[in-house]
Image (spheres, helix red, strand yellow):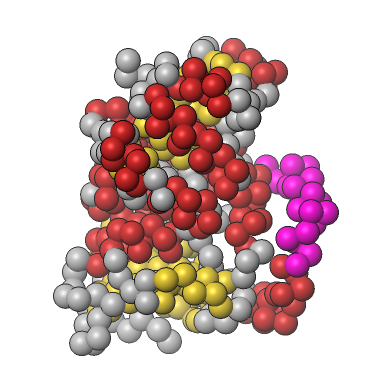
Amino acid sequence: MNTWMLYGCTGYSGKLIIKEALKRGHRPILAGRNGIQLASMAEKFSLPYTVFSLDDHSKIVQELSKVDVVLNLAGPYINTCEVFIRACLVTGAHYLDLCNEIYALKKIFNYQVMAQNRGITIIPDVGFNTVSADCLAKYISDKIDNPYKIDICIDALNKPSPGTIKGCVDVFTKGGLTIKNKKLTAIPYGSGSKKLELPGQIVYASPTPMGDLLTILKSTDIPEITVYLPSHPVVIEVLKLIGPVLMRLVASKSGKEVIFYLTDKFIKGPDDLLLNTKRALVWGSVSNSQGEHFEAFIETPEAYLFTSMSAVRAVERVLDDSFPGVHTPSQAFGCDFIKDFESVKRTDLSYNEKIWI
């Protein structure tokens, strides 16, 4: 068949992915729950579409039996990933998504044996965060013997999309996380913050509970992993003081409803100027117990724009050749997958350069 479906495509990232797909000669089947929005989008881009909800397993199976690959954009993924994966196990369709939710990823990784036995490919988060961080982590982990610790800092977010914020709510109500002894380890918000010397800038950064922790662990098997995001020092101190209270408020049903309402009303994502001018940076450092270390960084186009590129390229790779099982991007495509994209630069830094100040 060599056909693919884009589900949940009426949001910010969906529109960018459709444009990138058309630019590269694809005609994906658009799909989702809102028939009015889908019809409008399908007409705008002259693409086929189908409408179905995620509470009817037989209908999902029926629709996925018509395609080779489904790219799921419908979050939060904690609610949608297994619905699609179970249908893919029936139909034999391959499954990709943009999931960077750590607890959803734990669920997805549990399908390893079933996916292998069925001969289907499952690759969560073929978007900016995991493709860049995972490919960089795998690359630097191979540069020294017996790597023990990896630190990653992602400096990318300028104006988040509504879907990004909604997908983060459940994760960030659980507090901070890091990997210690190959296990997720909870840490209080604001703890572990550091001043980092990144290429051309010095930033304050805090450990963050992103799904990249699990994908990097899966790709590298390194015992200690921390993923940082730049944070203002004042924000870090505020989180130390009121983090637990803030988490309880956000975790409540009414708190989530307020956040989702405000997100839909006021958050639009980057405008065209930011999309075309903003650069994203991912920095990584790896070290071992012998005192060796290596660091490198990746520069990419704006994060959402890069997501549209990486998602479509991942679909192309899976259409060309399946990779049975559950994989990270670097496991399926190799750490040099990142080099396939225009305007992406990977730079090695000195082994002896000072990392933390």
Residue placed most toward the observer, 181 or 298: 181
Magenta segment range? 248-269
Image location (x, y in percent) of residue 116: 28, 40
Residue placed most toward the observer, 232 or 214: 214
The residue under the point 55% across, 26% down is 57
Q: Decide if residue 73 is in sight here.
A: no
Quadrant occupied by the C terminus: bottom left
Going by the image, does 196 lie left or right of 137? Answer: right
User: Residue pushed farthest left?
Assistant: 145
Image location (x, y in percent) of residue 173: 66, 64
Above or below, comparing residue 78 to residue 148 in the picture? above
Image location (x, y in percent) of residue 114: 35, 41
Going by the image, does 169 lie left or right of 288? Answer: right
Q: Decide if residue 233 is in sight here.
A: yes
Magenta span: helix, strand or loop, mainly? helix
Quarter-wise, where is residue 319 in the image? Answer: top left
Image location (x, y in percent) of residue 131: 37, 50
Above or below, comparing residue 135 to residue 236 in the picture? above
Above or below, comparing residue 232 to residue 269 in the picture? below
Quadrant occupied by the N terminus: top left
Going by the image, does 168 lie left or right of 325? Answer: right
Instruction: Confirm whether the magenta stretch covers residue 302.
Output: no
Instruction: Confirm whether the magenta stretch covers residue 259.
Output: yes
Residue placed most toward the observer, 353 or 235: 235
The residue under the point 23% across, 49% down is 334
Quarter-wise, where is residue 115 in the image? Answer: top left
The residue under the point 36% across, 23% down is 68
